Image (cartoon, helix red, strand yellow):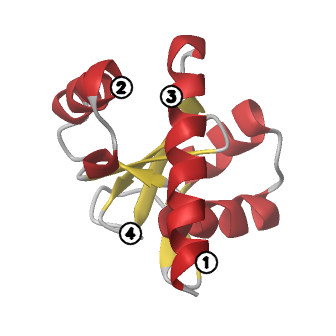
Amino acid sequence: MDDRGGRESGCGMCHLTDHAVQRTKERVGLPKRSAEKNAQKALENGIRHCETKGSLNRYITALYWKHKTANNIRIYCNNMYIFNNDVLITVFPLPQKYRSTAQKIQRKERSKWAGTH
């Protein structure tokens, strides 16, 4: 049980609430086992708030203030992953108008990483 009274599902380093599992199934189309792996990938490889700028950054800032327990918001595969530390709270689609910006940031980060290895 987590401190909010909901059950958590473990996945390596991150955990998922029952709500997060349900929303991943509903909105991303992944079953529970895949949801755990997907959440871990989002936590490790997703775009962080500090990597964004402009309207996308303002959008994430607004989400942060709306979900006050959320202190770790990631963008991964055109979805927003709302974490509290390493606990996934919920998932929802990234609005269409921010997707091209997110893809540019993802490509930039990948090329930066590839250049260092």
Q: Is residue 68 above or below residue 33?
A: above
Q: Which label's residue is closer to the chain start, 1 or 3?
A: 1
Task: Describe the element under mark 2 as helix, strand or loop.
Answer: helix
Q: Which mark is residue 11?
A: 1
Q: Residues within 10 Å of mark 2 (few under 14, many from 20)?
A: some
Q: Secondary structure at mark 1?
A: strand
Compute the Cα span from label 3 to label 4: 25 Å
Per the image, the residue denoted by label 3 is: 101
Cα separation between marks 4 and 1: 10 Å
Horizontally, is 36 left or right of 2 in the view? right
Q: Which mark sits nearer the N-terminus, 3 or 4?
A: 4
Neighbour tally class for label 1: few under 14, some 14-19, many 20 plus, Cα within 10 Å: some
Tag 2 residue: 56
State the image quarter where residue 5 is shown: bottom left
Q: Quadrant of the N terminus?
A: bottom left
Residue drawn at x 60%, y 49% as measured from the top left: 107
Q: Amino acid at mark 1?
A: Cys
Q: Residue at x 28, y 33 (%)?
A: 53
Where residue 117 sits: x, y (%)? 58, 87
The mark found on residue 86 in the picture is 4
Q: Amino acid at mark 4?
A: Asp
